[in-house]
Image: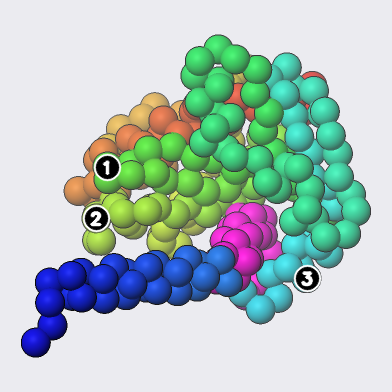
Amino acid sequence: MYTNGYIFRYAGIMVIIAAALLSTAAMLLKPFQERNVAIDKMEGILASAQIPGVTAQNAIQLFNEDVTEEIVINENGEAVETYTEPHKENAKAFNIDMKAELYKKSQGKPFELPLYVIEKNGQKLYVIPVRGTGLWGPIWGNVALASDLNTIVGVTFDHKGETPGLGAEISTKAFEDQFVNKTIFDNQGNFTSIMVVKGGIGKLPENDRIHGVDAISGGTITSNGVNDMLKDVLESYLPYIKKHR
């Protein structure tokens, strides 16, 4: 019969061994996890610009080929760093923590944001990453603007835990395709962002429908989150956009 002391020692040793194994596994897997996160990020950026044929297998290659500049801009719209070298996943812009920088903005502190320039069919496209809050957690994505820095070429959205069939629909092609050819400025040059309209853009005046998309039926809170995310983040890029329009 084993004594209580033996049982406790045995259990303690097994706990230590299990913890060591788990820690080692986490350390070994971390580079692969980080690589997968980077690839997913690249896929989203390229997909927003309507780059065809992007997969997890070729995302790094296409990202380095099609992204010609990665720019870090500050709250005044100034480019504080421009990266044009290969291995663009090493650029400061690619590794900016959007959540942290947007929090700085909310606190009235200086902040820096990334901007990606893509060459496609002889035209420059500008990809702006966006991040906000849905019903159950963070939502994020990318907005690709044409060379006029006004017309949307494409968007991608994703989420951590929105409700399937409702808020999770923000990451579907049907929702994202609505944004193509919409504009974020009106004819007088005023910033409008893109309105996600409950009940559909038919509720808007006809002249404003170019700045709106239909909200997701049954996904009001997530739709509102997308609406607020676009307004807040795109507004953060306005100083840069206005200098380069």
Could one spot residue 173 in this view of the protein?
yes
Q: Horizontal placement of 7 versus 23: left or right?
A: left
- State which tag comes first along the sequence, 3 or 2: 3
Please identify the residue farthest to the bottom as the structure is shown: 1
Where does label 3 land, which residue?
A: 61
Q: CA distance from mark 3 to mark 1?
A: 35 Å
Residue nearest the observer in this picture, 68 or 125: 68
Please identify the residue farthest to the top as the structure is shown: 108
Where does label 2 land, which residue?
A: 163
Q: What's the mark number on residue 135?
A: 1
Residue shown at 76%/42% (left/top)?
Answer: 92
Q: Horizontal placement of 88 versus 16: left or right?
A: right
Q: Secondary structure at mark 2?
A: loop
Residue nearest the observer in this picture, 65 or 137: 137
Where residue 133 sits in the image (x, y, percent)?
37, 38
Q: Amino acid at mark 3?
A: Gln
Label 1 with label 2: CB-CB less than 8 Å: yes
Q: Secondary structure at mark 1?
A: loop
Where residue 59 sits in the image (x, y, percent)?
69, 69
